[in-house]
Amino acid sequence: MSEEIIYLKKEELKELMQTKFEKAGLKETHAKEVATHLTYADLRGVHSHGAVRVEYYSERIAKGGTTIEPDFRFEKTGPSTGVFHADNAIGHVAAKEALGYGIEMAKETGVAVVGVSKMGHSGMLSYYVDIAAQNDLVALAVCQSDPMAVPFGGTEPYFGTNPIAFSAPTNESRPIIFDMATTVQAWGKILDARSKNLPIPNTWAVDKNGEATTDANQVNGLLPISGPKGYGLMMMVDVLSGSLLGLPFGKHVSSMYSDLSEGRNLGQLFILINPSNFTDLETFKGNLSQMIEELHDNKPATGFEQVYYPGELSEIRQSEHEATGVPVAKSIYDYLVSEDVHYNRYDHSDAFAER
């Protein structure tokens, strides 16, 4: 039976999350940024990266696994390359800081490749590429994550969900934004199903025996999207955001839950391109706006009312939630309004939050 859902205005949700992060130990500016990021995720309907994450982040912050006064350092390694040393700060803040250097570099040289080294979990990648597109840049972002996905043909987790996000500016009010895990679904989707007591499709994950499961509480491995193709993509992401930065790879990437008093040492990579260095910016944006119109005019297949460009449904959900409120599971709402920082539920669990 599904759980009751509470609808909150975005500012109320953001304030509740910020308060919880500050109580856990984050300074105000960092707490505000993380809360803004998670609100963005919930607004776009990606609840796997929204309020469902607050308790985990708060527990890690409170137990010392997040550096609350990080020594940020940007190392410029070439005219268009650099590494942002994050000192195991909370990833949302570190990634946005690194992105700022990348945007400045791409504006100056036409392209930028910026790695983020030794960071915490950074949330939803589309948040960052959205910012890049608003600065008239094309962006690609990749990030490594816990070994939670079974390789194609295997039964034991090796790579993470290893997401990829892409954005490009248009002449419309919003850019094109596409964000995907290289697994059929992100782990946060499983967490969201757990929080709402809902089953999952049998194509998402496998249990401890490597068999397909519909029980979110029995998940022991996620499946790569499109079999060998997703498997290849998750390996690519791992190389770009892990090995390329001299960080742990594959099954050696730290678990999100193994020890919340220790930093994660995760990696992320931004590739930013200035269209003005390749073509006329307004022509480029106009062509993408035309592409959107032509996709909308494409005759829909049976069972579909409309053809949308990739990522457009998130834009639609954001508009709806701006008007009606953000849906939050009652158990999460009860936690957010409580005096408790966390319930000690995640520390020393395995990759699937099980003790």
Image (cartoon, helix red, strand yellow):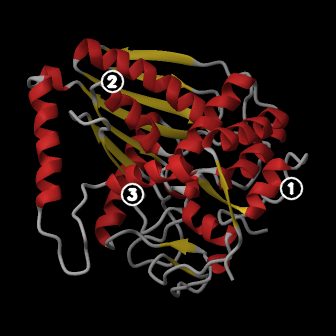
- Seen at 63% across and 45% down, the residue is 9
Return the residue at label 2.
135
Q: Label 3, secondary structure: give it.
A: helix
Q: Which mark is residue 344?
A: 1
Compare marks 2 and 3 and give the one earlier in the sequence: 2
Q: Secondary structure at mark 1?
A: loop
Q: For residue 342, say whether it is visible.
A: yes
Q: CA distance from mark 2 to mark 1?
A: 41 Å
User: Which mark sits nearer the N-terminus, 2 or 1?
Assistant: 2
Query: Alpha-carbon distance for marks 2 and 3?
Result: 28 Å
Residue behind mark 3? 234
Q: In the displayed structure, would residue 7 be above or below residue 277?
A: below
Q: Between 56 and 223, which is closer to the camera in this rendering?
A: 56
Quarter location, residue 264: top right
Viewer-nearest of discs 2 and 1:
2
Amino acid type assigned to the residue bearing label 1 in the image: Asn
